[in-house]
Amino acid sequence: MAELFDIFPYLRNDHIIIRKMIESDVDDLIEITDNPNVYQYIPPFLYRKSRGNLLTAVRNLGGRDFVQKKRIIAGIYLCEEPDKLIGLAEMFDYKKKASQMTIGYRINESYWHRGIATDTVRLMMDYLCNNMGIQKLRAFVMPENVFSEKALITNGFIKESYTVQEKNWGGKETVDLNVFTYSVQ
């Protein structure tokens, strides 16, 4: 079995593609991060930034951060529009000894309510659990983000009975987050 950070993942089903972002994706990324309806759910690594800063982020997310085994932040694309970045698939906080990883996703508002988040979660689960052997996945969701919760529950995640607090999500000083987990049976 390959190790998690051996090769940047390329994931695909009949609907979406998850792959490494490229520099030409930066304008689509700006469209995602500049939208206040999406921005309110964005964690600290992807604040509203200048075009130059987002270009550097695209380079670092697919390069330095992956090579240093920090995280996998990939682009989401529709199969019928394979050059249009419509979201981000996030795999981070890998704990090898615990066989655990955290996942997340951001979708351009123009593509909400099309099952893209559900497909993204399903592809990440298949890759991480079936191909990489990870036994437990976690996800954090702001309580008001009910559609994100639905995508996780549809894929077998369980909402835990506790919340956690994080800083700087959506530019807020502190936010409560619901915790969802999935364990391989």
Image (spheres, rainbow, N blue to C red):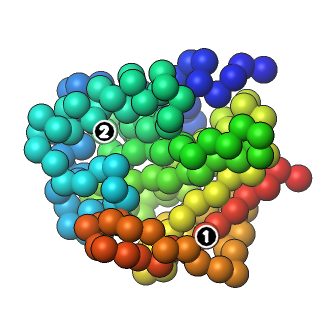
* Relative side of 76 to 3, left or right: left
- Residue 63: give x, y in percent of width and height: 39, 22
Residue 82 x %, y %: 35, 30
Q: Nearer the viewer, mark 1 or mark 2?
A: 1
Judged left or right of residue 133, residue 3 is left
Report the residue marked by disc 1: 179
Front residue (pair 76, 52):
52
Give above or below for 42 relative to 14. below
Could you tell whether 53 is left or right of 37 in the image? left
Which part of the image, by quadrant, shows the N terminus? top right
Q: SS of the residue at dot 1?
A: strand
Q: Residues within 10 Å of mark 1 (few under 14, many from 20)?
A: many
**Which mark is drawn over residue 133?**
none
Q: Which residue corresponds to mark 2?
A: 85
Secondary structure, mark 2, is strand
Residue 80 makes an appearance in the image: no
Q: Residue at x 29, y 26 (%)?
A: 59
Comes first in the chain, label 1 or label 2: 2
Residue type highlighted by circle 2:
Leu
Residue at the image point whose x is 24% and y is 43% from the top: 29
Mark 2 crowdedness (10 Å alpha carbons): few <14, some 14-19, many ≥20: many
Q: Vertical placement of 158 versus 86: above or below? A: below
Report the number of discs.
Answer: 2
Tell me whether the residue at label 1 lies in contact with that at label 2, contact meaning CB atoms closer than 8 angstroms. no
The amino acid type of the residue labelled 1 equals: Val
* Foreground pick, 32 / 5: 5
Image position of 45 with respect to 68: above or below:
below
Residue at horizontal 23 percent and vertical 25 percent from the top: 23
User: Could one spot residue 142 in this view of the protein?
Assistant: yes
Q: Residue at x 48, y 21 (%)?
A: 67
Residue with the most extreme right position: 185
